[in-house]
C-alpha cells in the first residue's frame, strides 16, 4: 500500500488527543471522576468534604459503604473462586468433548496458577462494587529474565565443563567474567567464573486496571463494539526501554506523580502517591505514564476501519517508536473486560453498590454524631448560678473543670446543674430503620452475616428461611450479572490470547495428571458455562439436594439402569459434593474415570458389569438348594454311620455284659460250693466236739490240789447245746 494514503503521524496524534479528551475517564469526565472519588472517600470513612465537623463536636462516621461492600465480598469470592473450575467451555460436537474439557482445565490453570487469579478476581469485583465498573486487561507477555551465578576456584576440568555448557546453550548461558589464578605454593591453576543465564518467558497475563487509568468513548454501550478506549500504563523507564521503545523518547517523558488525579489521591491511605524527588538519583526507576490507545480507524486509507493499538507518551502525546517504527499495530480485539453490579440499560457505566448507600451513610453519620453529642453533654452538663450567690472566685472555679473540683459560692445551694434531655431513645429506631433500608437496597443483612442475635426471636423457622432467601436474591443477581458480563468476557479473551500466541506444546498437570496441551489445535470458543455456584439456599441445603441426587443414582445403578447413570455422572456428583464441603480437589477421595494413561488406556479400568440381578438371584437360590441337598445327604450318611457304630458298640457291650454275667455266675457257684464245704466242715467239727463231750462224761472225779478227793464233780463238757467251758465247777481248783 502506498505510504501517501496512510494517515500521517501528526494527524494521528491530533485524533488521539481529541478522542482521549472527549472520553469518559478520570481527567475528562468530572462528574464520573468526582462520584468515584467520593465513593472511595466514603469507603475509607473520610467525609470531611461533605460533612465537616465543628470544633468540639463529634466527628464519628458511619461505615455503611464499607460494611456493605465487605459484606458482599466473601460470598462473591466464594462463588467465583471457591472451586478449581471458574468457567467451563462447552463442546461444539460429540467428538469435541475431550478437547473442550482440556481447554477448560488449561485456561482455568493459567488464570489461577500462572496468574494471581484470586487477587485479580478480588480487584475486579471490588472495583465494580465501589467505582461503578471493574476493569481487567488480558494480554500476551514476553520477557527475558537474567540470573547470575559465580563459581570460585574451579579446576581446569570444571572450567572446561562450564565452557562446554555455554557453547551448547544456544545463547542462554554466557560467561561474563573469568579470572585465572595460579597458586604460588603448588602451582595449581584455578578459575573464577561468572555466568549469566538468560531465560525467556512467554505467557498470557491477566491484571486488574485501576478505574481511573481507563477511559472509553462517550455513548459506548459495551467494550466489544466501542470505537475508542485507552489505558494509561504506569511503568518504570527501564521497563519501557526493555520492551523496545525508543530510549530518547522515554527519557524525555516527565515523571508521573498522580498528584493531579483526584481518584488516585482518594485511593491513598498513607500518602502513597508517587513523587519525583528520587527521579534524579535513580533515573532507571522513574515511573512514567504512557497511553495505550485502542481505536478503530482507516489508518491505511483503504476506506475500511480497523482496530489498532497506538502507544503515545509525554506531555504532548507524541507517538512512541518501538523497534525503530511508530508503534501503530493492528489488533484483533480490545483486550479489556468490564463489569458493573447494577447496570443502567444501554449504557457502559452503571451504578455501584456504593452509590446505593451513600445517602444512608450521610444520614446515619448525622444521627450518630447528634446522639454522641447528646451523650457528651449529658456527661458534662452546664452550671446555672444566680448572681447573688456568686462570689469573687466562683467564675474562676467554674472555668477550671476537673473531677471533684471545688466551686466557691456566697452561700450553700446556689448552684443548679442543667439537665440535658436524652434524645437517644428516639434515635435508635431511626438508625434501625436506615439499616433495614440499606439491607433492602443491597441484600446484605445481619442474618446473612451471622451477627443478628434476635433473628430467631418470636419467628418461625420458615419465616427466617424466607427472609434469608430474599436477602440472598439480590446478591445472587449481582453475581449473575458479574458472571455474564465481566467474567465471561475475561475468559473469552484469555482463551483467544492463548490460542493465538501459544506456539508450542506445554506439559502441565491438570486434574492430578500430566498432559500435553497444544493451543495451536484449539477451536474458537464463545460458548462457555460459568461456574458461579448459584444454588438454592446455603451449602447445607445444596449438600442435601446433591445427596438426594446421589441416592437416585444409586437406585438407578442398583436397578441395572446403566443407560441413565455411568461412572462420569457419579464422579460429577461426588466432585460437586466434595466442593460444597470445602474440599476443592475431589481426586483426593475418588478416581476420575476420565483419566487415561499415555497409551490412551483408562488409568482406572472400569469393572466389567455383573449379570442380571434376577439371574444372580436364581443362581444364588440354586446354590442354596444344592447346598441344602448336599447337607441333607451328608446328614443321612452321618446318621446311618452313627446308627451302625451304635449297633456295633451295643453288640460289643452286650457281649461284654454276657461275659460279666457268666463270670459272676461262676463266682457265685464257687462261693456256694465254698459255703457248702464250710458248712460240712463246721458240722464235722461240731460232731467231733459233741463226741468229745460225751467222752468226758466218763472221766474220773476230780481231786483236790493236794491229791485228795474233794468230792466235787467235774463239769468241763457242759451241755450239748453249748461249747466246752473253762470255768471250774468246784472251789478246789484254782
Image: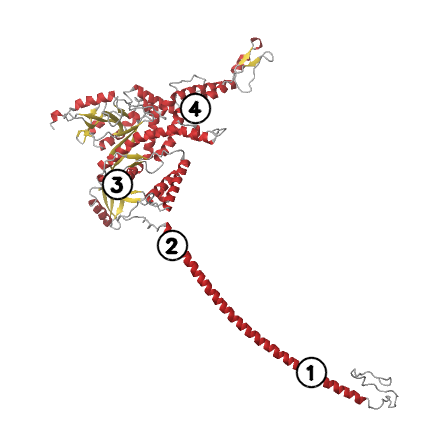
Nearer to us: label 1 or label 3: 1
Q: Residue at x 76, y 86 (%)?
A: 689
Element under disc 4: helix
Nearer to us: label 2 or label 4: 2
Element under disc 2: helix
Are the two marked residues, 1 and 3, in contact with CB atoms closer than 8 angstroms? no
Residue that label 1 marks:
678
Residue that label 3 marks:
94
Residue that label 2 marks:
619
Nearer to us: label 2 or label 3: 2
Question: Does residue 495 sit above or below 596 in this rendering?
Answer: above
Nearer to us: label 1 or label 4: 1
Looking at the image, can residue 257 be seen?
no
Please state the horizontal and vertical placement of residue 274, each as a whole percent of the image.
Answer: 31, 26
Crowd tier of the residue under label 3, counting other residues whose Cα lies within 10 Å: few below 14, some 14–19, many 20 or above: few
In the image, taking residue 331 as reference, residue 74 lies left or right, namely: right
Amino acid at each position: 500500500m502506498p505510504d501517501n494514503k496512510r494517515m500521517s503521524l501528526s494527524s494521528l496524534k491530533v485524533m488521539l488527543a481529541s478522542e482521549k479528551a472527549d472520553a469518559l475517564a478520570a481527567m475528562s469526565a468530572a462528574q464520573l471522576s468526582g462520584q468515584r472519588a467520593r465513593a472511595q472517600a466514603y469507603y475509607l470513612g473520610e467525609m470531611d468534604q461533605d460533612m465537616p465537623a465543628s470544633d468540639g463536636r463529634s466527628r464519628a462516621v458511619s461505615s455503611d459503604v464499607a460494611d456493605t461492600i465487605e459484606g458482599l465480598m466473601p460470598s462473591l469470592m466464594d462463588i467465583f473462586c471457591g472451586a478449581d473450575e471458574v468457567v467451563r467451555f462447552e463442546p461444539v460436537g460429540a467428538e469435541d468433548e475431550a478437547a473442550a474439557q482440556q481447554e477448560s482445565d488449561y485456561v482455568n490453570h493459567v488464570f489461577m496458577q500462572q496468574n494471581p487469579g484470586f487477587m485479580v478476581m478480588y480487584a475486579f469485583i471490588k472495583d465494580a462494587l465501589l467505582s461503578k465498573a471493574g476493569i481487567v486487561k488480558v494480554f500476551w507477555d514476553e520477557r527475558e529474565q537474567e540470573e547470575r551465578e559465580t563459581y570460585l576456584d574451579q579446576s581446569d576440568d570444571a572450567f572446561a565443563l562450564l565452557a562446554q555448557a555455554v557453547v551448547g546453550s544456544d545463547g542462554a548461558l554466557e560467561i561474563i567474567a573469568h579470572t585465572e589464578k595460579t597458586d604460588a605454593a603448588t602451582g595449581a591453576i584455578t578459575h573464577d567464573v561468572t555466568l549469566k543465564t538468560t531465560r525467556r518467558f512467554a505467557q498470557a497475563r491477566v491484571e486488574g486496571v485501576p478505574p481511573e487509568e481507563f477511559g472509553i468513548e462517550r455513548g459506548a454501550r459495551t467494550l466489544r463494539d466501542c470505537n475508542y478506549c485507552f489505558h494509561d500504563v504506569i511503568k518504570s523507564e527501564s521497563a519501557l526501554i526493555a520492551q523496545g521503545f525508543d530510549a530518547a523518547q522515554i527519557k524525555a517523558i516527565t515523571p508521573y506523580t498522580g498528584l493531579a488525579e483526584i481518584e488516585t489521591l482518594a485511593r491513598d491511605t498513607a500518602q502513597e502517591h508517587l513523587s519525583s524527588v528520587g527521579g534524579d538519583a535513580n533515573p532507571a526507576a522513574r515511573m512514567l505514564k504512557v497511553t495505550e490507545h485502542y481505536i478503530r480507524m482507516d489508518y491505511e486509507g483503504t476506506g475500511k476501519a480497523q482496530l489498532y493499538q497506538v502507544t503515545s507518551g509525554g506531555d504532548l502525546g507524541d507517538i512512541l517508536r518501538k523497534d525503530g517504527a511508530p508503534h501503530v499495530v493492528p489488533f484483533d480485539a480490545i483486550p479489556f473486560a468490564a463489569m458493573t453490579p447494577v447496570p443502567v440499560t444501554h449504557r457502559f457505566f452503571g451504578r455501584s453498590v456504593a452509590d446505593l448507600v451513600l445517602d444512608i451513610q450521610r444520614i446515619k453519620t448525622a444521627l450518630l454524631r447528634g446522639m454522641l453529642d447528646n451523650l457528651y453533654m449529658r456527661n458534662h452538663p452546664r452550671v446555672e448560678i444566680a448572681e447573688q450567690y456568686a462570689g469573687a472566685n466562683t467564675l474562676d472555679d467554674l472555668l477550671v473543670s476537673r473531677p471533684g473540683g471545688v466551686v466557691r459560692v456566697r452561700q450553700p445551694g446556689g448552684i443548679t446543674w442543667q439537665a440535658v434531655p436524652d434524645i437517644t431513645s428516639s434515635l435508635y429506631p431511626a438508625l434501625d430503620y436506615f439499616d433495614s433500608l440499606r439491607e433492602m437496597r443491597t441484600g446484605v443483612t445481619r442474618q446473612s452475616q451471622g451477627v443478628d442475635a434476635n433473628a430467631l426471636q418470636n419467628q418461625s423457622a420458615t419465616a427466617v428461611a424466607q427472609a434469608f432467601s430474599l436477602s440472598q436474591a439480590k446478591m445472587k443477581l449481582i453475581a449473575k450479572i458479574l458472571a455474564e458480563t465481566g467474567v465471561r468476557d475475561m475468559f473469552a479473551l484469555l482463551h483467544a490470547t492463548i490460542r493465538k500466541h501459544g506456539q508450542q506444546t506445554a506439559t502441565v498437570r491438570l486434574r492430578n495428571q500430566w498432559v500435553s496441551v497444544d493451543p495451536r489445535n484449539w477451536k474458537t470458543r464463545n460458548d462457555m458455562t460459568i461456574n458461579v455456584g448459584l444454588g438454592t439456599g446455603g451449602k447445607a441445603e445444596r449438600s442435601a439436594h446433591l445427596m438426594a441426587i446421589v441416592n437416585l443414582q444409586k437406585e438407578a445403578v442398583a436397578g441395572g439402569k446403566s443407560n441413565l447413570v455411568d461412572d462420569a455422572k457419579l464422579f460429577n456428583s461426588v466432585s460437586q459434593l466434595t466442593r460444597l464441603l470445602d474440599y476443592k480437589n475431589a481426586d483426593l477421595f475418588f478416581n476420575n474415570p476420565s483419566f487415561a494413561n499415555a497409551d490412551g488406556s483408562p488409568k482406572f479400568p472400569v469393572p466389567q458389569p455383573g449379570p442380571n440381578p434376577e439371574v444372580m438371584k436364581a443362581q444364588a437360590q440354586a446354590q442354596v438348594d444344592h447346598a441344602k441337598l448336599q447337607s441333607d445327604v451328608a446328614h443321612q450318611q452321618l446318621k446311618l454311620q452313627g446308627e451302625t457304630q451304635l449297633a456295633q458298640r451295643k453288640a460289643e457291650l452286650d457281649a461284654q455284659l454276657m461275659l460279666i454275667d457268666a463270670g459272676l455266675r461262676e463266682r457265685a457257684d464257687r462261693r456256694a460250693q465254698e459255703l457248702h464245704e464250710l458248712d460240712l466242715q463246721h458240722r464235722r467239727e461240731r460232731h467231733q466236739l459233741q463226741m468229745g463231750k460225751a467222752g468226758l462224761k466218763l472221766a474220773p472225779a476230780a481231786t483236790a490240789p493236794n491229791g485228795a478227793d474233794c468230792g466235787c464233780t467235774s463239769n468241763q463238757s457242759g451241755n450239748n447245746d453249748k461249747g466246752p467251758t473253762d470255768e471250774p465247777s468246784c472251789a478246789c481248783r484254782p
